Amino acid sequence: MKAVRFSTFGQPLKVVEVVEEPDAELKAGEARLEVLATPINPSDVLTLTGQYGQLPKLPAVPGNEGVGRVVEVKDSTAVRVGDLVFLPLGAGTWRTHVVTPADGLMPVPPGTDVQQASMMFINPPTADILLRDFVTLQPGEWVLQNAGNSAVGRYVISLAKLAGYKTVSVVRREELAPELTALGADVVLVDSDKLPEQVRAATGGAKVRLALDAVGGDGTMRLGDSLAPGGMVVNYGVMSGKGPKLSAAATIFKDITLRGFWLVLWMKRTPRDAQRAVFGRLAKLMAEGQLKTPVEGTFPLENIQDALARAMEGGRAGKVLLTPNGKV
Ligand SMILES: NC(=O)c1ccc[n+]([C@@H]2O[C@H](COP(=O)([O-])OP(=O)(O)OC[C@H]3O[C@@H](n4cnc5c(N)ncnc54)[C@H](OP(=O)(O)O)[C@@H]3O)[C@@H](O)[C@H]2O)c1
């Protein structure tokens, strides 16, 4: 089998290489999965540079989620050859094959688009938890977010719509408004220092209590300044490369609070059954076509440098996927 491997942390394009590895013999209870699609997420890039919250022992194979087809099973009835399953989270998925215990593998619901399913385990639960676990919103209330065209941002728009919340999505490019509106966004605004006034005008002065921040730096501050007194900004990403900050006017005069969210910690503190319930509910929505995000392009493992270069650029039309066993 082939795998992408890195042996030092550094500039992503420079530290990755594609290597041949021997096919491991299956032990009793194990399955061999052929990897069909696996995304390049911002957290993968941060892992390669050595800046992520948890780092693997090197050398390592990057990649945390995806979809595979069972090609071999030994002494287990948990899955059958031909089944489509979600790859186990954090399995080092940028490879042609993954060997894993068959027990606990989650089937991809019939009819799900394979490319969409490959992005199921990280960004959809992040959007879901951000909307549910920090501020208890009532139907009709507004939620404000930046990076509104990111994969997480799009899932937030769709899940908020299903829950009856209204969304203000902040983006960097005006041309994104029609496609986000078609997805269900109520308001799309281009980020600027005028954001607080624009949010007030667009929501009719509504008391906006929750803002979701993937940008950091001044981007966080503009969200905080747009919230109603007592509101909360939840920071879950730092696409600007800068730490989140709030203005003193927000913290002192409006009692705005800043919290952080990391899916890894949520998984550590959430019982397995409860996690599976969340993943199962979201996988069903994805199978029904209610959760989707565009794909910018698919790349074979051999073109990992091109794939990473594209994934690290701004202004993408969607996610970059690796398809290690050919197009899906
Ligand atoms: N905390 C957690 O557990 C968790 C879980 C999942 C994801 N995340 C984080 O969520 C964020 C979004 O992830 P994703 O996979 O949904 O992203 P994605 O689909 O790859 O999209 C990236 C987004 O970031 C924007 N962006 C890039 N550089 C920027 C900059 N300098 N300033 C402002 N915006 C910038 C892009 O805007 P353009 O299209 O205009 O370039 C785009 O909206 C990432 O920070 C990721 O690490 C966190």
Image (cartoon, rainbow, N blue to C red):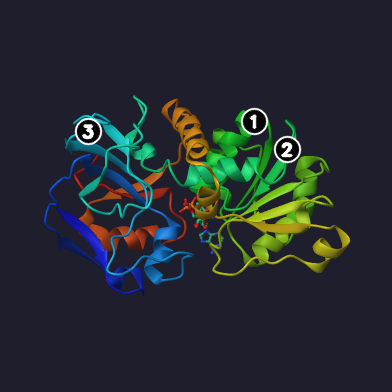
- Residue annotated with mark 2: 137
Residue 31: give x, y in percent of width and height: 22, 40
* Mark 3 close to ligand 1, CB under 8 Å: no
Q: Say whether disc 1 or disc 3 marks the residue closer to the N-terminus.
A: 3
Three-letter amino acid code of the residue under disc 2: Leu
Q: Residue furthest right?
A: 253
Residue 134 higher or lower than 62, as above or below: above
- Residue annotated with mark 3: 76
- Residue annotated with mark 1: 163
User: Helix or strand or loop: what does disc 1 sit on?
Assistant: helix
* Mark 2 close to ligand 1, CB under 8 Å: no
Q: Between tags 1 and 3, which lies in front?
A: 3
Examine the image and state in which quarter residue 9 appears.
Answer: bottom left
Examine the image and state in which quarter residue 87 appears.
Answer: top left
Q: Is residue 97 left or right of residue 155?
A: left
Residues under numbered marks 1 and 2 in contact, where contact means CB atoms less than 8 Å apart: yes
Residue 181 visible (yes or no): no
Q: Is residue 70 left or right of residue 292?
A: left
Residues under numbered marks 2 and 3 in contact, where contact means CB atoms less than 8 Å apart: no
Q: Between tags 2 and 3, which lies in front?
A: 3
User: CA gap, disc 1 to disc 2?
Assistant: 9 Å
Residues under numbered marks 1 and 3 in contact, where contact means CB atoms less than 8 Å apart: no
User: CA gap, disc 2 to disc 3?
Assistant: 44 Å
